[in-house]
Image (cartoon, rainbow, N blue to C red):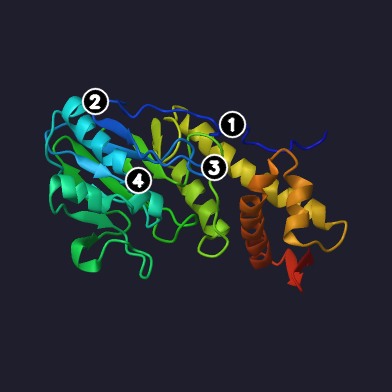
Amino acid sequence: MDRPARIVTDSMIGMKLPDYARLSPRVATVLGHNPGPFTGPGTNTFIVGASRRPILLDTGQGVPIWADFLVEAMTELAHARELDRIVVTHAHPDHDGGVAQARERFGDIMVLKMPWPGHDKVSADSMTAIGPDAVIEADGVTLRAIHTPGHAPDHLCYYLLEERALFTGDVVLGAGTTVIPDDTGDLGQYMDSLHRLLELDIETIYPAHGPVIHNPKEKIREYIAHRQLRDRQILDALEQGPLEVMAIVKKIYTDVPEYLHPAAARSVRSHLKKLGQERRVTEHEQRWSLE
């Protein structure tokens, strides 16, 4: 039987999401309004809490209209005028880019995240460092940090105990798949992170991009199978002889628009890096071959 070309078949291209919406009694979302080929309709930022001082989880890219919608959502959906704290999943600009805006609107709020020296936009003196298994409590909600490196070394997912829900940042998206940067990412670590998330008791995933996921175990298994398939496709392509990265992309990403091939090349390089660490492939003069 022929192997499928891909496992994950949905996409965020052309997707629309509301400016803000109530998702559950404890969670509301505000769209970051930074649409793009890798952000979909934009970054989901979350108001988390059942009181008048909720937590803000991620801050988008710093688009001015996001801050306006954040204030509206706080008033209409949370009946709140203050934030307890800001919690950040990781130091990519579409997640921590709006910290200054949130502070302009709500005061000098504490920012909690796992440090990534040289990459954090938030200065060390205005950030509270947290790490794996940190517990963040506010009225009515308890978040437990889970270190999930791979997309970024500082990436934390947050488990909402009261809902058995998981804020996955960029580890699991509402549609499509996440890019593993070939410079600062690590596909081996990413796969380990996915396997550890499978062990959690999860009913709902709130991703940083795309819609809410109501079949979390199925989605995570799909993500694992997708990466395993890409490994096999790369190895199959190299059976015909040494290839440069873009040649591999053109062989296996036949259903992806050409303008996305540079991003696909980043993922291929991440796979090759992992396969190289496993001693299954080797590189010579920018051409890859089987070990």
Q: Residue at x 63, y 47 (%)?
A: 227
Dot 1 corresponds to which residue? Answer: 10
Q: Secondary structure at mark 2?
A: loop
> Sequence-wise, which precedes: disc 3 or disc 2?
2
> Sequence-wise, which precedes: disc 1 or disc 2?
1
Dot 3 corresponds to which residue? Answer: 37
Observer-side mark, 3 or 2, equals 3
Which residue is nearer to you in this view: 147 or 123?
A: 123
Instruction: Please tell me whether residue 284 is drawn above or below residue 61 in the rendered image.
Output: below
Q: Does the residue at mark 4 contact the one at mark 1 (Cβ under 8 Å)?
A: no
Dot 4 corresponds to which residue? Answer: 60
Q: Secondary structure at mark 4?
A: loop
Q: Residue at x 37, y 70 (%)?
A: 118
Q: Residue at x 83, y 64 (%)?
A: 242
Asked whether residue 198 is in view, the answer is: yes
The total number of labels drawn is 4
In the image, residue 107 lies at what x, y percent?
12, 50
As measured in the structure, the alpha-carbon distance from the residue carrying label 1 to the one carrying label 3 is 13 Å
> Sequence-wise, which precedes: disc 4 or disc 1?
1
Q: Secondary structure at mark 3?
A: loop
As measured in the structure, the alpha-carbon distance from the residue carrying label 4 to the one carrying label 3 is 15 Å
In the image, residue 131 lies at what x, y percent?
30, 59
> Sequence-wise, which precedes: disc 4 or disc 3?
3
As measured in the structure, the alpha-carbon distance from the residue carrying label 4 to the one carrying label 2 is 22 Å
Q: Residue at x 49, y 54 (%)?
A: 151
In this rendering, would 243 be left or right of 99?
right
Tell me the quarter of the picture where residue 7 sits: top right
Dot 2 corresponds to which residue? Answer: 25
> Sequence-wise, which precedes: disc 1 or disc 3?
1
